[in-house]
Each structure stands twice: as C-alpha cells, then as structure tokens.
Amino acid sequence: MILLKLISWPYVRQHLPRWLLTIAGIVLGVAVFVGIHTANQSVVYAFRQTVDHIAGSTQLQISAGETGFDENVLDRVQAVPEVRVAVPVIEAVVGTGVQGQGNLLILGVDMTGDRSLRDYDLESSDPNSSDDIDDPLVFLAQPDSLMITDTYARENHLGPGAKVPMSTMDGQKLFTIRGVMKSGGLTSAFGGNLAVMDVYAAQKVFGRGRKFDRIDLAVKDGASLQDVKVNLQALLGRGFQVQVPSARAQQFDSISRVYITTANVSSVFALFIGMFIIYNTFQIAVTQRRAEIGILRALGATRAQIRTLFLGESVVAGLFGSVLGLLAGIVIARGMTGYIGSLLGEIYGIAQKADEISTDPSLMTFAVVLGVITSVIAAIIPARSAAGVDPVQALQKGKYQQLSAGENRVRRMAALVVAIAAVACLLLERYRIFFYVGDALALLSALLLTPTLALLLARVLRPLLRWLRPVEGTLAADSLLQAPRRTSGAVAALMLSLALVIALGGMTRASYDSIYRWLTVALNPDLYVSPSQSLTQRDFRFPESMGAQLGAIPGVGEVQLVRDARTEIQGKPTMFVAADVADLRRHATLPPIAGNTEEMFRRAAQGKAVLASENFAMLRGFKLGDVVDIPSPSGMLHLPIAGIVTDYSDEQGSLLVDRSLYKRYWNDNTVNIFRIYLAPGAAEADVKRRILERFGNQRRLFVLTNREVRRYILRLTDQWFGITYVQIAVAVLVAMLGIVNTLTVSITDRRRELGVLQAVGGLRNQVRGTIWLEALAVGAVGLILGLAFGSLQLYYSLHNEAIDIAGVQLRYEYPYLVALWLVPGILFVAFLSAIWPAETAVRGSLVEALEYE
Amino acid sequence: MTRWNKLAAVSVLFTSVVLAQDARQIIAESENRSRSKSQQYEGTLEVIGTSNKVSIKRWEYRRIGSFGASKAILRFTAPAEVKGVAVLIVNHTDRASDQWMWTPAIERDRRIAAQDRSTRFFGTDFSFEDLEERDVDQFDYRFAGEDTVDGAACWKIESKPRQSKSSQYTSSMVWVRKDYYVAAQIEAYSKDKLVRRIHYSDVQNVGGIWTPRNVEVFDANRKSRTVLKLEKLEYNVPMKDEDFTLEALRRG
C-alpha cells in the first residue's frame, strides 16, 4: 500500500492521460458487458414481471404451446378433486388507436371465477360506493367491455364509459371502459398497458374459435403442488405443459438464447481486447520505470514486492475502470432496453414491455470482478518482467533492456507447437470440445506469433516508408523495429479487432446470401394475407372458411392456408408449421438439404412424416429418417423426418406437417397466413385492392406483397445484425484506443529523440509526419495480420454458428469487400489516432524534452 | 327460485303437529309445502350500494320439476344492455347443481364451474350458490330455539352442509315461521363470520302456496343490499322439459 502511494501514484499523476487511455479499455469492456446484459435482463425482467403479475396467486398453468386447446379441457381440470380453482385465459397483444400508447396486453378471463386467482381491485365511478365495477352483468353481457389500469386511464384521460379503439379480427372496433383497476400487482404487468376482457369475448375478438390459450389454477389447501402437477400431466397427456408460472419466463430465455449468446460475445470480446491494451501499457510502464525498479531493488525490495506492486496497480486500474464502465454501462442499457425489447418482441413474438432498466447487483459485482481480473491477467506478464529487472542494467541511464533473442525463439517454438495442436484439433472437429480447443489454440498461436510477425512486417514496410518520406519514414520504421514490445500489444489488439470484423462481416454476408436465396427461391407466393403487420405475431387468426372466399376473388390463382405456432418439442419451444404439403410441393423450387424431393413431399402430404428445417436438425441432433416425438393435445405423434430443408422461419428451427394432420391432432382449423399465387395475367396491385375491398371492412387483415415481405424479413435481419454492428464499432474503437496508447507511449519514450531532432533543425511538420507514419505503420501491420487471421477466425465462427448457435451451414466466403473497406478505414483511423499524440509531441517544451530523463 | 326462496315458500297446515317435530322435519315439511310442478314470475332486482346508488334489473324466471331436482331458466329483460342474458340451472338431489350462462351478444354459453359458485351473481348480493336448490338430505340440522321475526313466531334451525357437500357457507341459521312454514330470515356464515343475511317479507298465498314476495339480501362484507320483488307469480303453469335445455337457453 505504501509502495503504491509512494511509487505508483506519482507515476500515474505524471502520466495521467496514458492511464486514462489504459483504463479506457476496461471501461469500454465493462460498459459493453454491463450495458448489453442489463438491457437484456431488463427485457427478460419486464417479461417475468408481466408473467408474475398476471399469474396472481396461480400455482400451475396448463398450456399446449401456442396452439391453444379445446374448452372441454377446462371441465376435465376443474373436475380434479385437488384443484381448488381453474380458470381459462386468453392473452393477446393488440394495437390501439390511442396515440403514443403503443400496444395493450389483453388478458381474457372468465370474470365469474377469476377473482379467486387474481386481485381485480377496481376503482368505483362512485367514490363512496364499494361496488367494484359499474355493472358486472353489463361487463359480461357486452363483448366490448374492457377494464383498464389506472395508470393507462390516467395517462390517456380515460374513465368509465370512455371508448378505446382496438384492433380486432373484425377490424378496428371501439371498446367501452367498464372498470378501472387500482394500482397493484396485476396493474403493473406490461408496464401498466394492460386491459382485461371477458374470455369468451376475447375468443371472438381474436378469432380463437372455442379454444383457450391457457388454464391458470390453484390447488386446495393441503394438496401437494407436485402431486397435482404430476396427476394433471398424466390426465392430459404429454401434449400439454403443466408448469409453474415462472416456467414461462424460462421459455423466453430459451427462445432468445441465440440473441443473448451473440450479445455476450460482444462484451467478452471487448474485455479481451481491453486486456491487450492494459498489457501494452503495463509492459511499457515496466520499460519506462526500469530505473525506479532498479533503485527499489538496490534498496532491498524483493522480486515478489516488485511483482506485487505492479499487480496492485493493475487491481486499482481495473477497479477504477470497472466502476466507470459500470456507470457507462447503465447509460448504454437505458438507450438499448427499448430497442432490444421491440427487437425481441418482433422476432420472437413475445409480449413484454421494457421501459425501465433493472440493475442486478450480482451482475454489477460480477462485472467489477471481471474488469479487475482482466486487468490483473493483463498485468501478470509485465509484473513478472518488472520483477525480473536487473538493477545494474536498469540504473545505466539510457540503456534499454531488450527482448532477448532466446525469449523470441522460445515464443516462436511455442507458437509452432500450439499451431500444430490447433491443426490436430481441426481434424477432430466433429467432437465439439476439440473444435473449441482448436479455436482457442489457433488464437493463442496467432498471439504468440504477433511480435515476430509485427517485426517482420515492420522490416518489410521500412523501404516503403522511406520511399514515402525519407527522414520521417525511416524514423517511424526504426521506432517500430527498436521497440517491438511497445507496439506488439497494440498490434495484437488491432489484429484481434480486425479478425473479428472479418469474421462478423463474413458471417453477416453469408447469412444475408442464404436468407436472400431462401427469400427469392423458396418464399415465392405473390401475396400474403396476414392478421398482423408483423408476421411473427400470432395473436389473431383467420377462420378456415376465408380461404375459399379468397380463392373466389378474381385474379387469385391459388390460396395456401398456413398455421404456425410454437410448441414444445423435447422440452424446447419449436416452431410448428402446418400447411397443405401437396400445394407447397407445386411451388417448391429449393432442393432439400437431405432427402428425396418427391418422396419427402409425398410422405409428408400423407401425414406419415415431417419435414425439418436445417437448423432444427442441426441444433437438436436429428438426421434424415430419425423419428421426432411431437406432443399434441390429442396425444403423441411419432413421425420420421422425410426431408431436411432450408427454412429460416425460426431461429430455433421448424417442423412442417400437413395441415390435415394438424387439424386432426390439434383440433384447430384456424389460419395465420394465407399465401396467395396470382392467376396468370393478374396484376398484383389489382388483386391486393380487391382483397382489401372484400374483407377490409369485415376483418383485421394486411395484404403484403412478396416484395414487402422480403423487405420486412430483410429489415428484421438488419435489426438482428444491429448487435453485430455494435461489435464491429467496439472492435474498431478498441483498436483505435490501442493505437493512441502506443503512440502516446512512443512519444513519451522518444521525447528526447524528438527534442534532439527539433534542436538540430527538424521541422514541426517532420516530427508530425514521423508520428503519423508510425501510426500508419502500426495500422498497416495490424491490418495485414488482422485480415489474415480473420480468414481463419471466419472459418471457426461459421462452424460455431452451425453447430451451436443458429444450426445453419453457411458458405465460407471471404468478405473481400469488407476487407477492402477496412484498408482505407483503418489507415484513416490510425491517422486520426495519431493527431493528438503528434500535436503533443510538437507543442511540448524543447528544453524539457532535452532534459527528459 | 332460490334455495332460500323455496324454503320461504312453505305454508303451514298443521301447526299443532309441529311442536313434536325435530329440526329436520320442520325443514322437510317446509319443502313439502312449497312443492309445485312449476313456477314462473317476473322479478325486479334492486342492488343498493353503500352510497345508496341503486341499479335496477328485471328478469323472467321459469322453473319446472320438484324441489331439489328442478330445472330453471332465468332470463334478464332489462336494462337493454343485459337483455337476453340467461342462466340455466339444473338442480340435482345428490350434488351441486349445473349452471350455464348464455350471452346473446357473443352467442356463447359458458358453464359456471362449481368452484365459482361462491362468487357474486352478476353484481347482486346473491351468490351463484344461492340460486341452487338443495335437497334436505344434503344438510345436517339442529334445533336452536325460538324467536320472532317481524312479529311472527319462528323456529330457529341451524343447518350445516354434510362433509361430502361443498358450500361456501360452513353453517346457516334459518328462522322458519310457525304459521306458514315459510322462512322469515336466514343468516349464512363462513367460519362463524356472517356472510349474508336474507330477509323475507310480504308473504302471500299464491295458488295455495305461501310465498314471500319480497326478498332482501344483505352482504355483510360489502355492506350492500339487494332487494328482489316477485311479480306475476304463478305456480303449476304448464311447461315443457325441452324448454329447459342448453338449446332452449340459446334459443332465447
């Protein structure tokens, strides 16, 4: 502690800007980590809160995925002796015409019994009355009845009797407020944007037929919850999920797994790169403070004390950086929560409303610990170097302790061994563990080789720099060659950042190409008729009879009825698509990934098999011919996979079955989307207009052209890759910090040299030019190594994406365009990074510079 | 009509015999005297909140069958917002009744689950359970003394649902008028706490059956009252069984 105060603190004060730059790496890493995690957590927390508040005193919930189930299931559940109360529920998110208020979560309940589970503490229109609702009979008798929360009422100046416009299956309708709920548990669900209506009215409004989404229940006093759960599961069969309410929130985690994993990579990567900046700074500090270290050693300080001193500094730097990062992270989270919430809502169709951020103390603590650990790890090697300083050499003024040739040789040998091990792992990549170990070894090998390769490239660049500017170029190149330790950290950071950019760029490109190919070849209907603008929202459904009505419209050649819903397969939510397979066959143009086209469509059309998407097969470990156990409300279906096809409908994978099979087992003939092929010669705009004219006034529907659907999916893809762009921005920013850091140190190191240069007649512009060229050289070296290592990293990323994240085999295609953009981009960034250090160098006092050291 | 109303509809024939009867026999006799093949009336329902805000509804009531095994349909006629809403009650001698509600605006019927019977009947101070008729044998009785209600001499009888029968009430105290064998008052308790008090008045002889034409329910928790007035009351009117089915409920 005393050493920290006497030795470290004066050094930090003297080099404050550099220290700030050093901790900037940690700040950035922790900020991104905390920001993304807090934003994610806030969205998940908002969903959990909504689930909890809506659940009330519900102990168990019964559902059958998103498909819903017949009303008679309720009677069977209510007849179980241990069940105290069981009530039906329909949940839907609808748009309202109330300006600026967004969506409203509608909870359809049976008010005759629901109060046993949920507390509807209502405000009375008559302040002296204890009547909790104006008239419960009117509420039930009139299907336009709505109860809203007092928050919603207050914000929109609504009261009993007021009308609220709302989207229904029959178009926009006015609903009458017949009750206002006082603030309390239930009312805070979905950020207060909650309305309650009669469950049977909700069936009609949302086109659910005679089905419920869910049954909420509570057990009798003294009955064991676990026993009741087991009994109900046995009674209803595996097609139903009997779960505690919190399990719904776990489903959200499961569904958004891919997104969360991607987000985690960003933050960990930022910290990883930050580690190299810290390493660089500490390594330089050791070099600069060798005299100080020499004196301490001469005065009797042990090697352990010197090591502890540097590690102590790293703890303080890590702590300081982490706390700053924490604060910055909260600011980032505030900005991102709404964005992530709406993105997840749109992609996964899950209702939540995240307005507020929720900070988790354990996450904050973890982030600080992570920041400090990162800082300490980065300082281990420099601290060891510091402890190894020879006091005699250190006290000889102006003499640098060079990296020994032996050390370089050892490192090169180690890199070679590690590279061979990485190649060996590559041969065994079918075993996950070897694949990931191989990736880590390839990274380690690249890092071990970085100083040698950087030196080699600096030598190659020397003639070029000399040719560009004979004096400045030579000085800049020599600076790199004489002090490789000074630049190796920055080069490594830059290399890693650019490798990430290449990997992400390559993955994005390959994903876009695949999605685009699927969009243009497989998704070929001319028009789509959907009950919502977002194709992922499945709250509203059409009746089957509408298919024939659409078919009768002039210009409509063929109508395909599609019903998709998420259901649980192997305990994981899986998208289930039901359509007339024979119809699909007529328009299928994309060859299957596995299976015989004719055979697979024939068997699927007969209801004897399913078609699995590539990502379903890959992520769940299914092969052609494997049997999938599909739970349905009417019992288990055991169907073999007849074909594996390209389908990006859902990230977790999808299964396609024939509609007749779905109707039989799910007893559901509703439709989510009508896919329409035009008759020859029919004009798309005319048919769209006719559909809208025919149904526009009767039903809530959107007619989307193929172009609009493609645009919509590409927009979602863009939004999805938004997180990738954040990763790229972080990577470039960290790389920039690395260059600024290196140059700042370089200038400080060469202050005397630069002072001499000016004293013997060197112009300020020449000094500037030297530093600019040095920056460009660091940028160029990092660029070359990054683009090369990126090609390897892209391979690993694509494979990782295939086996563990998206389950899709993407084509390896080096993103030359991205690489081409990076060349001027990084050189420009390097130049920008050099401006401030260069100005510092030329504006400093010449006398001071010559007196330096 | 309601269980309470049926009790109240009993008339006295042989007062002298009563002294010798036990509590169960009094209730059974009361039930016997209210027995009819059918019943119909038009009811006016006044719900009076704690601030004396009054809401009025009207319904038509038709019942077929004998006490405990009867079927009844109650159809709202006013105000306009609730017109056509109907409830079908099918009573059973050995178990709780089955009840369905019909909502014409959405053309849907819904089953009122047994678990929901303790909830208020459409904002009135009656509960769904209060609409049921229950057989004498579904309860145990205890003679609790004598009293007067509105000046009429009454027997006080405590009734408790038998273990196997579910009821929101753990016990009820019934005041049965000695003159007509009609209930004058009922207090229903849940774990010794008063839940509802039902007061019967304006007892008239209609077609040979003594029936209170005025029923007032007091909800002890909410401190609100509901008054039901029976008009155009008739007994033993010809009715058909097929008019008391789910299809009939939907037909309106």
Image: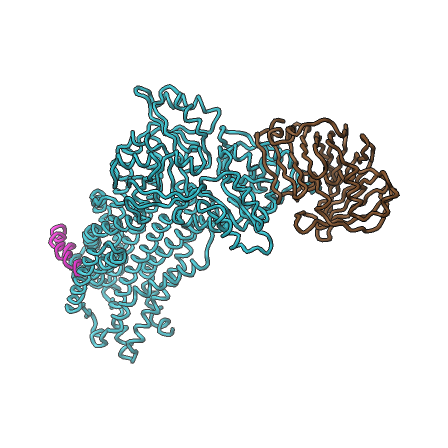
Q: Chain A is drawn in which colour?
A: cyan
- Image point 73% across, 51% down: which residue? B193
Report the number of discs.
0
Q: In which quarter of the image is residue A491?
A: bottom left
Q: Does the magenta stretch include residue A340?
A: no
Whole-percent x, y for residue A625 in the image: 29, 44
Q: Is residue B6 above or below residue B20?
A: above
Whole-percent x, y for residue A309 in the image: 33, 72
Asked whether residue A193 appears in the rendered view, the answer is no
Whole-percent x, y for residue B136 in the image: 73, 44
Horizontally, residue A487 falls left or right of residue A726, namely: left
Asked whether residue A739 appears in the rendered view, the answer is yes
Going by the picture, which residue comes out furthest to the bottom? A300
Give whichever of A100, B242 is nearer the camera.
B242
Q: Say which quadrant the C terminus of chain A sits in.
A: bottom left
The residue segment tinted magenta is A452-474
Q: Chain B is drawn in which colour?
A: brown
Q: What colour scheme governs how the chains and residues are painted in the rendered image of this protein?
A: by chain
